[in-house]
Structure formats: structure tokens, C-alpha cells
Amino acid sequence: MLLYMSNSAHDARSTPLHSVSVAGAVVREDGRVLTIRRADNGTWEPPGGVLELDEAPEEGVRREVYEETGIKVEVEQLTGVYKNMARGIVALVFRCRPEGGSEQLSDESTAVEWLTPDEIADKMGEVYSVRILDALRDSGPYVRTHDGRRLSDAS
């Protein structure tokens, strides 16, 4: 999603362009969280993707989670905003509750699993596990920055 574009050459140099993504931290009643192993890079992450220009963030979360996992969700609340400083991607993460559907693979996922918080910390890289662990806390939303692999010291 393009947040701002300028027609002037001067403004184009000084105005940053960002992409916006959304992800769902889908939490079952037993505390397990829905995750996928991505087909493109093999990493474990919460389901999510690029927010379309014509959709609200909550709509995007519902669409992305369903497309990648087959699970329908109710979006409960925004739990964090995470900026990849290296790539200019801002990710909005929402805690969700499963409402139906059944786990299925997609072109974007090679595995769909419900993991415990301990399993999340073991299987996921820092910048993805923190999104889910933050969503399990009630003191958010959190705002964090990272370089794609590690959280920034200020986060």
C-alpha cells in the first residue's frame, strides 16, 4: 500500500514510501496460536500479507488468514505496529479468535500448525515471535522497529 506519493522531484526525494502489511495472531481457547511455515522461505510466521489498497486493515487480516490457513477469524484488537526499517514495511498485527473453517495449505504455506507460546519462541525468528508474544499480552499495542532479523534496541 502506498501511503504518500508526490509529483514534485524534490518531494519525491524527501518523502518516504512504505508498504503496509497485516497479520493475525489467532489465539484458540487453549492458548495455542495459528502459524504457517512459508512456502517461499521456510520460516514460521503468523498468517498475513500485503494490505490491498481498497480494504480496511481488519478486512485484510480476515482475508489473509483465511487464504493462507483456511481458518475464518473474528478480529479482536490491534496489538502491535512493527516497522522493517531496511525494507520500509509497516506491519499491523491484530489478535483474532477463530470462528470456523479448517486448517488447509495454500500456495503460500507448506504447514499450518497451532503452536504454544514456548513453541513459538523456539520455531520463529525474533521479529515474528515478538508479534505473537505481544498479542498474548494485554498491555499493547506495541510499536517496534527491526531490520528484518533483529529488533532495534529502542523497541
Image (cartoon, rainbow, N blue to C red):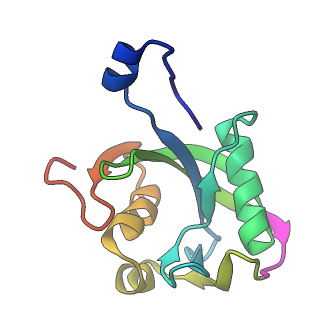
Picture quadrant of residue 17: top left
Answer above or below: position of 137 versus 12: below
Rendered location of residue 35, percent (x, y): 58, 76
> At 64% from the left edge and 45% from the top edge, which residue is drawn?
51
Answer above or below: position of 40 versus 48: below
Q: Residue furthest front?
A: 9
Q: Is residue 1 left or right of residue 75?
A: left
> At 46% from the left edge and 38% from the top edge, which residue is drawn?
18
> At 66% from the left edge and 79% from the top edge, which residue is drawn?
109
Rendered location of residue 52, percent (x, y): 70, 42
- Residues 111 and 7: in front is 7
Magenta region: which residues? 99-104
The total number of labels drawn is 0
> At 58% from the left edge and 44% from the top edge, which residue is drawn?
77
Rendered location of residue 103, percent (x, y): 78, 80
Rendered location of residue 104, percent (x, y): 79, 81
